[in-house]
Amino acid sequence: MSDNRFKIVFDGTLLPGVDINTAKLNLAALYKSEVAAIERLFSGQPVALKRDLSQIDAQAYLQALKNAGIDARLEPEPAIELNLSEVRDHVGAVTEPDSPYTPPQVEVAGPVPEYALLKPFGVEGRIGRLRFLAWSMVLCLLAMTVAGVFALIGLALVSTDSTAGLIMGGILAFILGVVFLIASVLISIQRLHDIGWSGWLWLLNLVPFVGSFFPLLLVALPGTSMTNRYGAPPPPNSTAVKVLSSLWLVLIALMIVGAMAGGISAIQDAYENTLESRYQSGTITTDEIDIEVEPPPNSTDDAAEQAQPPVDSAQE
C-alpha cells in the first residue's frame, strides 16, 4: 500500500458525562441498526469498528463517534498483503452472526451534525431555555396581534348584525385559542426533549397544583450539552433570541410584582370593608378601634354650674 491506513477501535469506553443507554441509542442511530446488535460492542473487549481507512476518513469517522458519546481510538493498520481466498475467509469470520465481536456491517452515511435543525412546527428537535422564552414571547405577541384584528372584525360585524357578529367572534376566538395551544405544546415538547424527557410529560400541566409550577421547570432546568435520544443539541442562541428572552423575563417579573401588589391591595380593601360593615352593624367593640374621645370644651364648667343649687333672689 502506498499510504498509511488506519482502523477505529472501541473497547466500551464512553466520553465523560454520557449515559450508556444514550450512547447505545446514538450508536444504533449512527449505524442505522437495532440496539440489540449494538449491545455486543459493549462487552469490554477491543473491537475494530472500521478498518482500512485513510487518515482523513478515519478522523471524520472518529469525530462522528465522539459526537455520539463514544470514546473510540485511532490505530494504524498493519500493512499485510492478503490474497483473495484469505480475504474471503476473513470476511466470513467477521460476519459470523454468533461472534460477540461482530461489528455492524452498515457504512456510516457521514459525520453526525454538531447541531440539530430547528423545527418550530414539529414535535421533533430540541430548543434551549432562552429560545423557549423567545419563542413564547413571539407566540404571545402574534396571538395579541391576531386577537386585536379579530376583535375589530367582530365589532364591525356586531355593528351590522349583532347575532352574526357574536357567532363569528366566538368562532374566531376558538380558532385562535386552538392554534395558540398547539404552538405552545409544540415548543414545550421540544424543550422537554432538550432536557432529555419525554414530550408526554407536558400533560403534567393539566394536573392541579403541579401544573402551576411545571412551566417554571422548563425555564430553569438546563438541557443536555451532548446528543441525547432526541437528537443533537440545538444551535447557539442568536442575538435576537437573547434580547427577546430578556424582555420576556422582565415582563414576567413585572407581572409577578403587579399581581402581588394587586393581591395586597385587594386584601387591604377587604379588611377595611369588613371593619366598616362590622362597625355599622354594631358588632365591633371599642377595643378593636383605637379612637381617642376628647371631652367637649367647657364640659367641666357646665357640670359644676349644673350642680350648684339655684339661688333665690328674695334671700339675696
Image: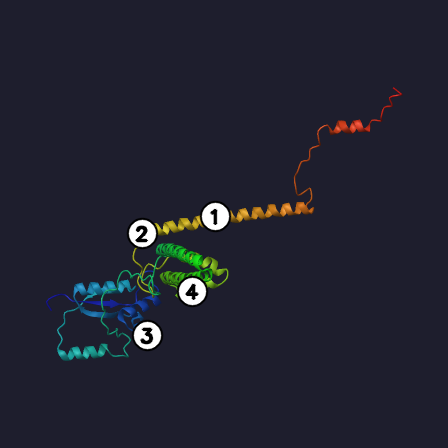
Mark 4 Cα shell of 10 Å, populated few (<14), some (14-19), many (≥20): few
Q: Give the secondary structure at mark 2.
A: helix
Residue 254 lies, in percent from the top left, at 44, 48
Mark 2 Cα shell of 10 Å, populated few (<14), some (14-19), many (≥20): few
| Label 4 vs 2, first from the N-terminus | 4
Q: Are marks 1 and 3 in contact (CB under 8 Å)?
A: no
How many angstroms separate mark 4 from mark 3 (CA)? 27 Å
The residue labelled by disc 1 is 258
The residue labelled by disc 4 is 201
Q: What label does residue 240 carry, if any? A: 2
- Residue drawn at x 62%, y 48% is 274
- Residue drawn at x 79%, y 27% is 304
**For residue 28, side relative to residue 147 (left or right):** left
The quadrant where residue 4 appears: bottom left
Nearest to the eye among marks 4 and 3: give it.
4
| Label 4 vs 1, first from the N-terminus | 4
Residue 201 lies, in percent from the top left, at 42, 64
The residue labelled by disc 3 is 36
Q: Are marks 2 and 3 in contact (CB under 8 Å)?
A: no
